[in-house]
Amino acid sequence: ELDTSVSNEFTLAMIKPDAVAAGKARDIMHAIESNGFYIIAKKYIQLTEAEAKEFYGEHEGKPFFPNLITFMTSGPIYALCMSKIGAISAWRALMGPTNSKEAREIKPTSLRALYGTDNTKNACHGSDSTNSARREVLFYFPDISFPQLVDQGDLRKY
Ligand code: RTP
Ligand code: MG
């Protein structure tokens, strides 16, 4: 029976420069699709410094921010708009903990355990809430206009 307490959601994933440079993007996209996500839109792009700072604006001022921006602009990434029932939490579960070293300890089958290196080079990103999912999907795909994405929050705020 369908669990109606969890609805179809959209989330924004990135395959980060470390995983793309290591040739792991195909494996990660395969894992995404075998775990029941639909890839709705895909973009291969190298972020400028200004774009990376805008995307990660909430982290500005934190000690790891400069390293994060250097890393995220170091090479091309894939940005993926994905959909699934409960996509936001399902994708974060599939990625595993932020720190790939910790991921290898506590969730060895997770994508960050398999494809990441440390606390910064961790192979992939996922939105952490419906609000950030909407903002992040629109950051990469401003022309997207699925009814579900509108339902996910109030688009007029953006
Ligand atoms: P993400 O946003 O990428 O899905 O990761 P997250 O929520 O698990 O982690 P968050 O706290 O939002 O941090 C964003 C990204 O910044 C880098 N980071 N480095 N102490 C560190 O060196 C550190 N902490 C975070 C990671 O690339 C992290 O994914
Ligand atoms: Mg985050």
Image (cartoon, grey):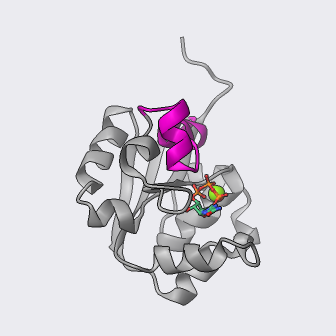
In the rendering, at what x and y percent does residue 130 appear? 67, 50
Residue depicted at x 66% and y 59%: 132
Quarter of the picture containing the N terminus is top right
Quick check: is 53 in the magenta stretch? no
43 and 96: which one is in front?
96
In the rendering, at what x and y percent does residue 142 appear? 51, 73
Within the displayed image, which quadrant is ligand 1 positioned in?
A: bottom right
Q: Main secondary structure of the magenta part?
A: helix
Indicate left or right for 61 with 69 as reference.
right
Residue depicted at x 32% and y 39%: 31
Specify the quadrant of the image occupied by residue 17. bottom left
100 and 52: which one is in front?
100
Residue depicted at x 54% and y 83%: 51
In the rendering, at what x and y percent does residue 24 appear? 27, 54
Indicate left or right for 149 with 17 as reference.
right
- In the depicted structure, whether residue 121 falls above or below residue 82: below
The answer to whether residue 158 of the structure is visible from this angle is no
In the image, which residues are magenta? Answer: 86-109
Residue depicted at x 37% and y 59%: 41
The answer to whether residue 34 of the structure is visible from this angle is yes
In the rendering, at what x and y percent does residue 92 appear? 56, 42
22 and 125: which one is in front?
22
Quarter of the picture containing the C terminus is bottom right
